[in-house]
Amino acid sequence: MHIFVDADACPVKQEVYRVAKRCRLHVTLVANSWMRIPDEEGIVLQVVGDGFDAADDWIAEQVEAQDIVITADIPLASRCLKKEAHVIGPTGKPFTENNIGDALATRELMAELRDAGEIGGGPPPFQKRDRSNFLQKLNEVIQLIRRQHPGDATE
């Protein structure tokens, strides 16, 4: 089990570090440019080019079944689910086979409405409750994977 973080705009990196350290999991942060990360074993930064979707492509190529991906990017979440990874948004919302189709459709609709000038703005501001929800869901997913795959759940 490995945690991949779509790191450029991720607001829960500190939470990922804490949980990964406690659970002895490896974390790879994937970003388009250098960023400071803790100097701890098991946490690495993978800087990719700034090409369109370069970070998403790198994560989708590396992720394996039973890995965990942290991202708000719905198309990336869909690609990772196809590889049987677990995907969690920064607000704690899990992406699953049951909800990814609706999420993709909603994303397309919202893009069309923005392009037509019908709506503006972006997602709601990140809240303390979102951080708490994220921590709870990350812990749940780790425990689920460890129960389902007891011999494969650590690196």
Image (cartoon, rainbow, N blue to C red):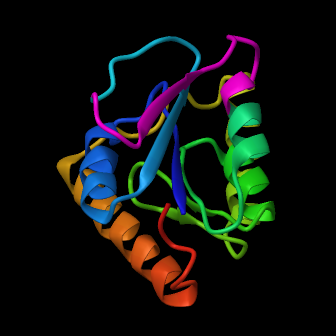
Give the residue displayed 24% in from the left and 50% down from the top: 18
Magenta segment range?
A: 39-55
> How many marks are shown on the rendered structure?
0
Classify the position of the N terminus by image quarter. bottom right
Query: In the image, is residue 115 part of the stretch drawn in magenta?
Result: no
* Magenta segment includes 53: yes
47 in relation to 57, above or below: above
Q: Residue furthest bottom?
A: 147
Q: Is residue 83 left or right of residue 123?
A: right
In the figure, is residue 112 to the left or right of 95?
A: right
Q: In percent of the image, x 38 and y 53: which residue is there?
A: 91
| Residue toward you, 1 or 57 | 1
Specify whether 9 is left or right of 117. left
Q: Nearer the viewer, residue 112 or 43?
A: 43
Q: Quadrant of residue 35?
A: top left
**Is 90 in front, or is 30?**
30
Residue at (29, 61) in percent of width and height: 135
Find residue 101 and report its horizontal and vertical position in percent: 77, 63
Instruction: From this view, report whether residue 23 is shown above or below residue 27.
Output: below
Is residue 111 something that shows in the picture?
Answer: no
Residue 79 image position (x, y, % from top left)? 78, 52
Q: x, y percentage for residue 74?
A: 67, 47
Give the residue at the far left of this rendering.
128
**Residue in the image at 64% along x and 30% along y:** 118
The reply to whether residue 131 is in sight is yes
